[in-house]
């Protein structure tokens, strides 16, 4: 079972910026324990571009698809046998990242 | 009610949770288990009157439900080969190793009370899957519309499936955190048994109260140091102790002030009082169940209603309001206020709860009683009418109707 694990940051109350060493160590553990599928930190939402080509020609717009106080700062894809395992890891990930975590199963 | 009807009702009360729990373990899916269990009970309703009640109703229901589930899965397999592979893999799994608790129904409770589900969904799901209550009964217990309750349960089951919430007893580390939600569920189950709803149901469903007490005893055996588990058990025992005096021979609910206290179960009272004293001796700040148990300990200490220590009860309610600011607690507190400061003061408190409790029968029944004591018969009658309209319990309706008809 794969889960999308989103790291949620808050513009008005951002998490601390010194988390990279702890995140790297946590990633090493995810790899060792067989949970790691993919991970990536994201650039600021200001760097996002939305493309809509449902009409006659593509329309490009600057910024994220939804402006909000809370936004996606990074993500993992984990392999886990069930939600209990994923939630236990996510609780650790929240401490490691100093941010909220959303766990969502892939279909 | 015929013998066969009684046997079906009894089998539903006794066997529903076992059937659902067994099938959930076997098929790994709550939805399949619930639907197959419901189909098995429907089959019992159809066949038992003609074929007779089987010697072991539980075994008959489990076997029938298992067949229904397999039929259902075969039908699905024909439509979807990929699905078939998944099912076959599930069936080949070795049985789960025994966990900390060997009661299937408790395993089912912990799964239904998973922290990834919203609290209201946990309550609803457990009452449906473990308690065997129907969606209308659960909707009544929560004071919400049936359609909303149906959706809540469907959504919870869908999340369990999509997110793969495991059907497993929590590990020893996780157990305490899971218990809070379980206690809330058990208390609601107990309350539904104590004041059962539905015209075709006994006014007190002894099986539900007994089941809630049995499961609470099991949780207490696992967590003997947890004060709230002890508090909830004491609370249930002290309420259950009054059950023999609670419904009259004519099927009418008997209010606390009119009960024959000689009919109370002294063994249950002694056990409840012992637990309350044990918690007091522990010297730890009590949670809401422990305070509620203490209130009931005060009531059950009075041999006569006139001996009731109402100031002690009000002090406990004042404490409880700080722990649980719900309007229902405030309503019960007002009843103690009426005894100490008179019905007029109490009525002023009750009237402030009109908005949140507009559809709660006990709000109108309490108002009706206070208005009656104040001699405001016309308003009292209207409040009784509304309470009778909203009440789901047959014995309570009988009690409220008599009180209304006695108004001058």
Image (cartoon, rainbow, N blue to C red):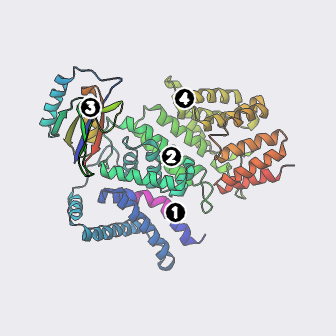
Q: Which mark is residue B323?
A: 4
* B54 in the magenta segment: no
- Position of B98 compared to B62: left or right? left
**Which of label 4 and label 3 is nearer to you?**
3
Are dots 4 and 3 on a single chain? no
Mark 2 and mark 4: Cα distance apart in space: 24 Å
Is the C-beta separation of discs 4 and 1 under 8 Å?
A: no
| Chain under disc 2 | B
Reply above or below: A90 against A95.
below
| Chain under disc 1 | B
Are dots 2 and 3 on a single chain? no
- Reading the image, the residue beneath label 1 is B10
For the N terminus of chain B, the quadrant is bottom right
Q: Secondary structure at mark 1?
A: helix
* Label 1 packing within 10 angstroms: few (<14), some (14-19), many (20+): some
| Chain under disc 3 | A
Q: Earlier in the sequence, mark 2 or mark 4?
A: 2
Q: Is residue B66 visible?
A: yes
Residue reaching furthest front?
Answer: A56
Residue occupying the point 49% across, 80% down: B50
Residue occupying the point 30% across, 48% down: B163
Q: Which residues are magenta?
A: B9-19
- Reading the image, the residue beneath label 2 is B213
Are dots 2 and 1 on a single chain? yes
Q: Which mark is residue A45?
A: 3
Residue reaching furthest bottom?
Answer: B50
Mark 2 and mark 3: Cα distance apart in space: 54 Å
Q: Which mark is residue B353?
A: none
Percent of width and height locating residue B189: 52, 48
Is the C-beta separation of discs 2 and 3 under 8 Å?
A: no
Q: Secondary structure at mark 3?
A: helix
Residue occupying the point 55% across, 34% down: B274
């Amino acid at each position: 079972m794969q889960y999308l694990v989103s790291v949620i940051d808050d513009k008005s109350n951002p998490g601390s910026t010194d988390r990279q060493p702890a995140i790297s160590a946590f990633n090493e553990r995810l790899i060792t324990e067989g949970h790691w599928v993919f991970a990536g930190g994201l650039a600021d939402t200001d760097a996002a571009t939305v493309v809509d080509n449902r009409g006659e020609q593509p329309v490009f717009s600057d910024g994220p698809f939804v402006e909000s106080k809370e936004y996606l700062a990074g993500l993992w894809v984990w392999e886990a046998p069930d939600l209990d395992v994923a939630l236990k890891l996510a609780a650790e990930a929240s401490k490691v990242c100093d941010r909220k975590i959303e766990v969502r199963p892939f279909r | 009610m015929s013998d066969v009807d009684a046997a079906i009702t009894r089998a539903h009360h006794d066997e529903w949770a076992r059937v659902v729990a067994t099938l959930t373990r076997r098929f790994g899916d709550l939805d399949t288990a619930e639907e197959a269990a419901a189909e098995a009970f429907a089959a019992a309703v159809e066949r038992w009157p003609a074929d007779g009640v089987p010697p072991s109703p539980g075994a008959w229901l489990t076997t029938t439900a298992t067949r229904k589930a397999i039929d259902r899965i075969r039908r699905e397999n024909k439509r979807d080969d990929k699905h078939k592979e998944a099912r076959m893999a599930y069936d080949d799994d070795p049985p789960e190793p025994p966990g900390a608790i060997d009661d299937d129904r408790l395993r089912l409770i912990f799964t239904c009370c998973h922290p990834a589900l919203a609290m209201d969904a946990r309550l609803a799901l457990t009452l449906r899957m473990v308690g065997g209550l129907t969606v209308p009964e659960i909707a009544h217990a929560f004071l919400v519309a049936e359609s909303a309750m149906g959706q809540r349960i469907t959504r919870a089951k869908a999340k369990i499936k999509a997110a793969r919430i495991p059907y497993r007893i929590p590990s020893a580390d996780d157990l305490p955190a899971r218990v809070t939600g379980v206690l809330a569920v058990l208390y609601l189950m107990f309350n539904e048994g104590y004041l059962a709803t539905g015209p075709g149901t006994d006014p007190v469903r002894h099986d539900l109260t007994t089941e809630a007490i049995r499961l609470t005893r099991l949780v207490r055996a696992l967590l003997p140091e947890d004060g709230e588990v002890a508090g909830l058990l004491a609370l249930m025992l002290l309420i259950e102790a009054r059950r023999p005096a609670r419904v009259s021979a004519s099927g009418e609910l008997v209010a606390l002030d009119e009960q024959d206290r000689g009919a109370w179960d002294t063994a249950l009272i002694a056990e409840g009082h012992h637990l309350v004293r044990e918690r007091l001796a522990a010297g730890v700040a009590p949670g809401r169940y422990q305070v509620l148990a203490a209130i009931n300990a005060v009531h059950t200490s009075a041999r006569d209603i006139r001996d009731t220590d109402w100031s002690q009860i009000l002090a406990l309610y004042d404490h409880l309001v700080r722990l649980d600011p719900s309007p229902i607690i405030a309503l019960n507190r007002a009843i103690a206020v009426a005894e100490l400061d008179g019905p007029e003061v109490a009525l002023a408190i009750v009237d402030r709860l009109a908005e949140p409790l507009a559809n709660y029968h006990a709000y109108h029944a309490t108002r009706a009683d206070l208005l009656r004591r104040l001699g405001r018969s016309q308003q009292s009658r209207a409040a009784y009418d509304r309470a009778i309209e909203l009440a789901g319990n047959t014995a309570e309706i009988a009690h409220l109707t008599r009180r209304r008809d006695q108004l001058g």
